[in-house]
Amino acid sequence: MLGFLLRGGCSPLVCLWALLLPLVSLHRLNQHGRRGHAGMNRPKLLLLSFDGFRWDYVDRVPTPNFRSIMNEGVTVEQVENAYITKTFPNHYSLVTGLYAETHGIVANEMYDPVLNRSFSMETDSIYDSRWWEEAVPLWVTIQKAGGRSGAAMWPGSDVRIHGMYPTQFLQYNASISFETRVERIIEWFSAPNEEAVDFGVLYWEEPDESGHNLGPQSPLMDEVIAGIDEKLGFLINELKKAGLYEKVNLIVTSDHGMTQLFTDNIIELDEYVSRDLYTWVDKSPVVGILPKEGKLEEVYNKLVDANPNMVVYKKEEIPKHFHYQHNNRIMPIIIEAKEGWTVMQNRTGPFMLGNHGYDNTLRSMQPVFVARGPAFRQNYVKTSMRSVDLYPLMCHILSIRPMPNNGSLLNVKDLLYPELVPTTPSTPPRVNQYSYAPVVGSFISVVMVLGFLVFYIRQVTLKQLPSLKHRSREMSQPLLQEDLHL
């Protein structure tokens, strides 16, 4: 091509542009491909949590929208969530794949002896990033992989974690309606290709609040559960209206269940140990006890056999299957009430008719799990899974490499549509973040430009010399042609 251009009297600038044009085009194609991987071509996933939605609520009243997802997708009958079965620990486990002892959000109320600070879901302490940075949530991971995320009220999603917020997020405000949250999520998923989110998390406070106030056995809960199903229906309709329903993988789950409490089933710690000997850190039914300096053995001995309806552990004695031991935010003594019982200092405090936080193997503590979308099988029922297994499953669906986690894709790969089942589950496919094409293209460009300049200088120089009998302009073509074939 170079010989043709020069024989045709091509000017040096035109020749140079002709040489560089293919390289520019290749670079643009490469950039387009990278953008496509990071945005338009990445699978979409929406994770929805209805706080406190127990696994058997779907069978209690007609729930046509849950049933629709179950018929079109997958159901898991028994989900073993993370201990303790509280809101903040379990929501962080869902998006990190880690048990509470590893991700560090060990309770709704915590004390960190290293930071010498207290954490409460009722205060602004939740916005201190130091509480969250023992783990990396999925919205941070996908953004580091070139994707985008959106979060509507998910616990921790309005905190800067490892220097990042979700791409789009709502500051937590319980007064914002479910419908408004959904509309915002739909906007984020429906944005132009390079602005649309790939992964979204959506949180709603019910039926947890009603479960606490009414108790799960109350007939009034029927209306609350039916209302949750209607809200799910609203989400489904909005996804359909936006043309997203067949494109977005939808997972509907919860953080925990709920059990009924009774005013006769109260354990009063003031009957057994003086408040002067300890600090009460977390609330019932798993109470964190921080003994005053030098008082650990005294407090433990006063409590360990005090009441048959509670179990008292020193930190190092907590059963290993709870995965709730190796973190300095777990108190030296914890008290676990038996199901249906409440631990209080005395009866003057507020009493709830329903609660959660108990042993995660109890059926009453376990959440609902249904999912549908292009990644999932249809009308498939799985007996059991662990909530930490959801994280590697979501990473696989989103084509990103998971961070180290306590889950296993092997445990849940049967939920996937057969063509999407990984052949090597331990190494999930990921979007290639690094392309060598720009480097190769730049190298070729430099070689071509240098080659052209050498050739051009020689041409100019030779024109100033007497003509050589056997000189030919084709002499330099073979080297340049070889370069062009790189």
Image (cartoon, grey):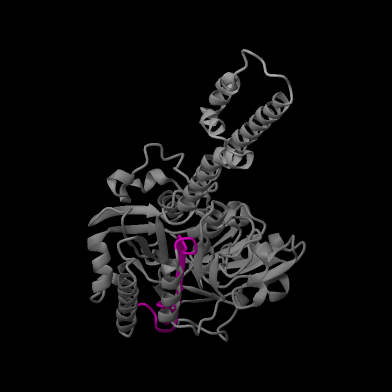
Magenta segment, which residues? 193-216
Q: Position of residue 465 (x, y in %)?
A: 73, 22
Q: Position of residue 136 (x, y in %)?
A: 58, 55
Q: Determine if residue 293 is in view.
A: yes
In the figure, is residue 226 to the left or right of 28?
Answer: left
> Is 211 part of what is drawn in magenta?
yes
Q: Nearer the viewer, residue 329 or 440?
A: 440
Q: How many marks?
A: 0
Choose top left, top right, bottom left or bottom right for residue 434: top right
Q: Position of residue 449 (x, y in %)?
A: 64, 35
Vertical side of 302 occupied by 430: above or below: above
Vertical side of 232 occupied by 113: above or below: above
Choose top left, top right, bottom left or bottom right for residue 213: bottom left
Q: Position of residue 296 (x, y in %)?
A: 70, 61
Vertical side of 131 occupied by 397: above or below: above
Q: Nearer the viewer, residue 92 or 396?
A: 396
Q: Determine if residue 261 is in view.
A: no
Q: Residue at x 63, y 13 (%)?
A: 469
In the figure, is residue 285 to the left or right of 257?
Answer: right
Choose top left, top right, bottom left or bottom right for residue 314: bottom right
The furthest residue to the right: 293
Vertical side of 412 occupied by 288: above or below: below
Q: Nearer the viewer, residue 80 or 156?
A: 156
> Is 75 part of what is drawn in magenta?
no
